[in-house]
Image (spheres, grey):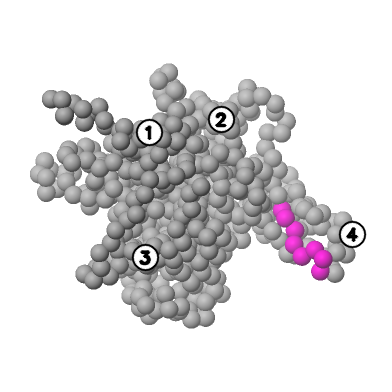
Amino acid sequence: MYEAPKQNDALGTTNRGNPCESGLCTLCSADCKGKCETWLSSLLGRKLLYPRNFGETTAGSANVVAEGVGYHALRIQGYAYGAQGLTDRLSTASDDRIFPNVDITTRFGRGVQTTCRLPIMTGALGSTFIAAKYWDSFAVGAALCGFPIVIGENVVGIDRAAVIDNGRISAAPELDRRIQTFLRWFDGFGAIIVQMNVEDTRNGVAEYLIDKYGDQVIIELKWGQGAKNIGGEIQVRDIDYACFLKARGYVVDPDPTDPGVRRAFERGAITSFARHSRLGATDLSSAEQVRTAFMGEVARLRALGFRRISLKTGSYGMEALAMAIRFAADAGLDLLTIDGSGGGTGMSPWNMMDHWGVPSLPLHAKAYDYCRILAERGITPPDISLAGGFAREDHLFKALTLGAPFTKLVCMGRAPMIPGFLGSNIEGVLRPERRAAVNGNWDQLPSTVKALGKAPEAIFSGWEAVRQKVGEEAMAEIPFGAVAMYGYADKLACGLQQFMAGARKFSIDQLSRGDLMSANRETADVTGIPYMTDAQDELAMAVLTA
């Protein structure tokens, strides 16, 4: 079994806990003082692409043959000649064919095209309290960087200030805050996507959105996610709030209205309650019934006025994957996000994350196969976003290329949250009057940050770029977490450009599965990507036998 290294001496990064394949710690804490690769990238930006202490060190990678099946067992091809994807913006001179000129913008959508400055999007940030606390950093950062951000399920349902009467929302202040925060800085790149589950449908979220925001939002139907195969969950410690959530129609466990549970809570034996969403489609028993219900819901949303609709599905089996792809294609959806097991941004049962569903690489490899089958039959597959354990620029290249030409975006859940945490902690120290507002966790800067500087202009590599973008006066409104997000996105963008330049691909649409090779034969069998010494062997024979 593959185990990600806890330390990287070349980059000077260290994980506080056990790292996942993504390089993030298994348990990512908002108060962390560093310094995994994503954490440090949020401050240093593209500088972290390179080994530290240049001029005093040399660096070498182990490059051992990978074991196990996963994205770690895919390797990226490089080529000794050629250049593909050149456009009118580049001259024929080789001096213009350099990695900063690689075009990493992407577009998705069947009828209405949505353009993104870089091919990433966030995972769904919904009713989890950590999403609410750091939303300003997440949303402003996404808007400034120009990629889509997703408001997850249940945001209206858990909002005590929301007014819902018989499935009709007359007030949804938390949902409004999240949408308006993004739109305040939106400049035409990226999008705000609002997810809708069973309870959201009952509560009339779609009707509220179309009446108030029209075509400014993309609405997303949710089948599932990679963290769990039951509905979304949060944990609450207030028994009165737990009762409120039960009255709103949620499953709350244990039952806060049970007299025995209340007595146990009062005595301290029970300290919290889990709020669960309902399972969808429990009244359906076949793929054809699912299709009929799904197409009916899409038709309802279009009749309301939504021009852009997406679908999020989880790491279910092959039938559910095929249904998601085929039904999304037939319905003309704008995007389908396919989430592999087993990360989560909310309160997911731990052993469920470890043991249910299909891991990302096998799931994504099969998604490509199914999209190809449709395309060969003359059916246009939906544009795809792949999710499940991505945090670095090599992950972006591999995911986009594994699913090429169908994959347009890489969905990242936990990783883009880290800049929000980190920036907020720094802002809470440097602007103590705002510590509570930004949910800062530190009383002073740790040595990991002091080593970079004591002022934000020195700490954040992205500070000046953001200042130039928004202007000096508006800079006071920008959360430090958004500036950290800008630095992290800059590192991802530059790193992706470098990988693409090495593969001689100067635009996203030129990526192909031939730009990957498998590092072991088991991965080759699962993905259809040839083992590295088999890849291009026919071309090699043509050279040798010429």
Residue positioned most to the right: 259
Compared to residue 308, the image places residue 501 above or below, namely: below
Instruction: Please state the extent of the stretch shown in magenta in the rendering.
Output: 268-275
As drawn, 242 above or below 540: below
Residue 65 seen from this side: yes
User: Are the residues flagged by discs 1 and 4 in contact, CB closer than 8 Å?
Assistant: no
Q: CA distance from mark 2 to mark 4?
A: 43 Å
Badge 2 is on which residue? 318
Q: Which residue is mark 3?
A: 9
| Amino acid on which the number 4 mark rests in the picture | Gly
Q: Amino acid at mark 1?
A: Ile
Residue 526 rendering spot, x and y as whole percentages: 46, 33
Q: Nearer the viewer, mark 2 or mark 4?
A: 2
Q: Are marks 2 and 4 in contact (CB under 8 Å)?
A: no
Mark 2 and mark 1 in contact? Answer it, CB < 8 Å. Answer: no
Q: Nearer the viewer, residue 543 or 104?
A: 543
Q: Main secondary structure of the magenta part?
A: loop
Front of the two marks 2 and 1: 1
Q: Which residue is mark 4?
A: 260
Q: Which residue is mark 1?
A: 529
- Secondary element at image label 2: helix
Q: Position of residue 471 (x, y in %)?
A: 32, 67
- At x 41%, y 23%, the residue is 375
Q: Amino acid at mark 2?
A: Met
Report, in whole angstroms, how far the alpha carbon at label 4 lies from the one at label 3: 55 Å
State the residue at coordinates (21%, 37%): 84
Which quadrant of the figure contains the C terminus? top left
Q: Is residue 158 above or below residue 471?
A: above
Measure the C-alpha gap from mark 1 to mark 4: 58 Å
